[in-house]
Image (cartoon, helix red, strand yellow):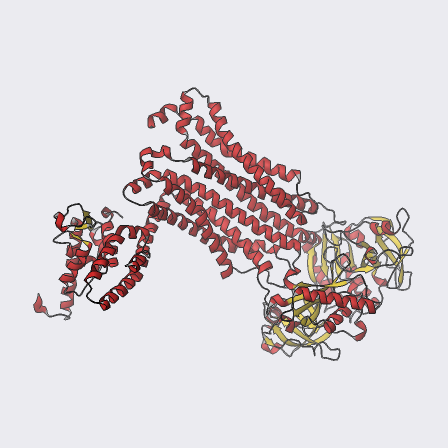
Amino acid sequence: MILYRALLWLYPRSFREEYGGDMYAIFVRRWRLAPHAVNRGVLLVEAVVDALHNAPGAHLDILTQDLATAWRTIRRARALSVTVVIVTAVAIGATTAAFAVADHVLIRPLPYDEPARLVSIWQAGPGGGRLEASPANYRDWRDNARSFGRLAAFQSVSRNLVGIGEPVRIEGASVTGDLFRTLGGTPLIGRTMTSDDDRESSVPTVVISERLWRDRFASDPAAVGRAVTLDETTHVIIGVMPARFEFPSRLVDFWIPQVFRPQEYIYGNPFLHTVARLRRGVTREQADAEVRAIAGAVARTNAQADPRVSAMVVTLRDQVTPQARLLLWILVAAAASLLMIACTNLANLLLTRGFARQKELAVRAALGARRHRLLRQLFTENALLAIGGGAAGIGLAVIGIPTLVRLVPTTLPVAEAPAVDLRVLAVAITATFMSAIGFGLMPAWQISRQSDARALHDGARSGIGRRTARVRAALVVAQVSMSVLLLVGSGLLLRAMLKVQSTHPGFQTSGVLTLRTTLPVKKYESVSLRHQFFRRVLDGVQALPGVTSASYTTGLPIVDRAGIWVIRVPGAEGLPAERRLASLRFITPRFFETLQIPLRGGRDVADSDTQASQPVAVVSDSFARHYWPDQNALGRQFTVRGVNWTIVGIVGDVRVRGLEQPSEAQAYLPEQQMPDRGLSRYVPRDLVIKTNRPLEALIPAIRGIVASADQQQPISDIQPLADVIAADTAPRVAQVRVLGAFAAIAFFLAGIGLHGLLAYNVSQGAREIGVRMALGAERRTILRMVLQRGMQLALIGVLAGGIFAVVAGRWLQALLAGVSPTDFASFGGAVGLAFAMTVVGSLLPALKATRVDPLQVMRAD
Amino acid sequence: MAAHELSVDDLLPLQPATFHILMALADDDRHGYAVIQEIAARTDGAIRLSAATLYRSLQRMLEQGLIEETEDRPAPDQDDERRRYYRITKFGEAVARAEMRRLQELLRLARASGFAPRSAS
């Protein structure tokens, strides 16, 4: 008997309450009539089967019925339904897209075997900063550390690929043989490298990317075994890596062996990155302690090693900069706030609609519908809207994700755009479900509570209980505060962006075209050969109509942030090494003229500065001030790699490290005074051209000029110099746009929410207003009354939002580029906007209130 | 789902359980258990509706307007206060007749195809 009662719980409540008693009575009667225990057993089994068969059916009956009713209701209130779906879609789309990107960059395991065990080892500078490893560091760690199962070193390189189609400059990595096994990458075809490949005596091999294989070899399996020429060196292709293998960055098209000759194992030449696989059971902390100990031991025994430099181990995933990480979390937080605002807004909207339907519901209640049935019906309606919004939201997310891709750091070895997969869909569905609960259940519950028989008698007037009114007001306050928070946040980021964008880079970008011709090291080992090439290109380019000047440099500012040397200056030897750094560039004449870097004194480098003449240098203002404050730096000397350079010119400072970071002082040396062999990294490769014609028009002519100087020389990275600056601030522009869009939507929704609440209050309070007016209240008093209510709510919201924003501002600080987290303009702007919104949102309902006709509302009673 | 929204044709063909219930209510108002017993008696025990099937059918039939609950009760000594009695409506009768015609037509076609002896008509 108890079992049967329990089985009844499987049925929908309404069905159970309606028929449970009768069903139970029938069961009891049959039970009593059953002659034997066996018959009773059969009866029980039948009852279980019956329940399992019919209970889901009974639920389905109700659902079908509710869905049909819901669909009719939704179609009847079409404008409202469309609004709900759109608002939900926007919020869910934003949340899903933000999550997809954050998940892609921060959470999802990297696409390698057991990625949690992958780490990289760095030198730890005196200030705790990460420095690349020198070959000797790599050797120390590889030979002495027991924490790592495998350890590999690599550096990013680029090579001219010649002989297969057009000559082209391709990006790749020079890697020690263990790299592939450390990461656990298996090739598409062929094999990967082993430790046999990085020996000096080995035949040079190369592993290529799927992309290169496709583009240059038409995905021909016979490509394996072919020889290709990369910068004059012949490499044999041994394998092709699948497209998902994007290490160390997604730009990589080939991997060649990194060979160390014995004499190259030195300290103080840091250019290597490392990746290592922790042994099973070894933690990052243990590995970190071990490499520190090794660094300490080496410093004690080896005079070459810098005792202030230690070592550190970071997980591969943590290579994402704290800024990028923070930015993505902010994005997710902003999207979640938006979702919350949307839900509260919709809850309010549906609550309003629900009260308007109160009479209908009361009638149904009077006809016998129980409260839980009404609740279920209302929830089905709202859930249906949420599902519609969720589906549309997923569509929006798919469209929106590509615009967020700029927020994916290029340094991370993952694909550029995250895919919308099951995991992302699960988040979208969860968000939908939460919205359904958030804006579906609450109003349904509130309304069904009211919809007892009382509502029928009292009519619409009883509509809003005091408690419900408080809930609704709280919802509006929450929306206002959230939107103030988002407004302040995007205001702060906007100010930071403007501040960064207004930073002068130290050079002019307008009318400057840049491109790169990276000369193969072996072919162009001697200065004279290189000079010949530069001369032919520069003479040709400068003869083009519209070109005012052109020059070659080692690397463009902002694009090339490396090339930092420790220099010696007589009298300044006592300064620590990190205060004697300079950014070194070899240039051809007219570089300063082309980039309009002001010449403060002395002269430019000249064609007459050759191997035969005295080594000369042009230095930046900050260089001169640093070593010779209050003195003339012209004629002074400094030493780099044993060469004494005499300063012949002083120019303005340039932001080599980008607009947001301080740069080392700059020193420019004449290209002809580079030593033959050695310093190959500094061979000028970036051509800058100042012109007064449209930039694109020049490109075909330049291609011809370069080809006539060297038929096999590829050109790469053609872009206006302005794009370099734009790229530097692109992540900021993207983040301001995204957060700004979120804030704008939130603000708009909050405005609608406030307006909706006040409008509803006015319609519900029409009788009270009518009485007041009948008693002689002036229209102005009524107007003030409604506006005051709006202002009250806005004030509480703004205060709360302001407090949140102060807290959030601290959190944002790392992204603010020096803008104060309590920046007055951002806060003032947000508060001003919030109040403006309040006035606009309140005005219509307030005016409507003044038009209430006392006679009419009294008569309606 | 009010009955006036439905026409007779909307409900055809009837589910067997529904048709049986309509037949059981054709001559008398009955409560749930009596409906089960009546159907079992009419079919010589071949069809014994389970309680859940019965009440799900009754619920749907009420909504469709095929039957209604009735206030008329039999003599108090035969009645249990808690029981609810069901009565076939005019609409229910019309639907049952339409179903019968549908089945007759089906039978006629089946005979024409030689599935059943013609003499039975």
Q: Position of residue A695 (x, y in %)?
A: 69, 54
The residue located at (37%, 32%) in the rendering is A461
Look at the image and tell me whether residue A540 can be seen. Answer: yes
Q: Quadrant of the image for the N terminus of chain A?
A: bottom left
Q: Nearer the viewer, residue A618 or A711?
A: A618
- Residue A191's place in the image compared with A341, above or below, is below
Most foreground residue, A110 or A281: A281
Residue A442: quarter of image? top left
**Quarter of the rendering containing residue B57:** bottom left
Foreground residue among A130 and A312: A312
Judged left or right of residue A295, residue A389 is: left
Q: Position of residue A699 (x, y in %)?
A: 69, 58
Q: Is residue A289 above or below residue A768?
A: below
Q: Is residue A339 left or right of residue A768?
A: right
Q: Residue most toward the top?
A: A776
- Please tell me how many numbered marks the rendered image carries: 0
* Vertical order, A114 against A853 (above or below): below
Place of residue B74 in the rendered image (x, y in percent of width and height, measured from the top left): 13, 48
What quarter of the picture does the C terminus of chain A occupy? Answer: top left
x and y percent of residue A162 in the render? 69, 71
Q: Is residue A165 visible?
A: no
Left or right: residue A502 versus residue A491 is right
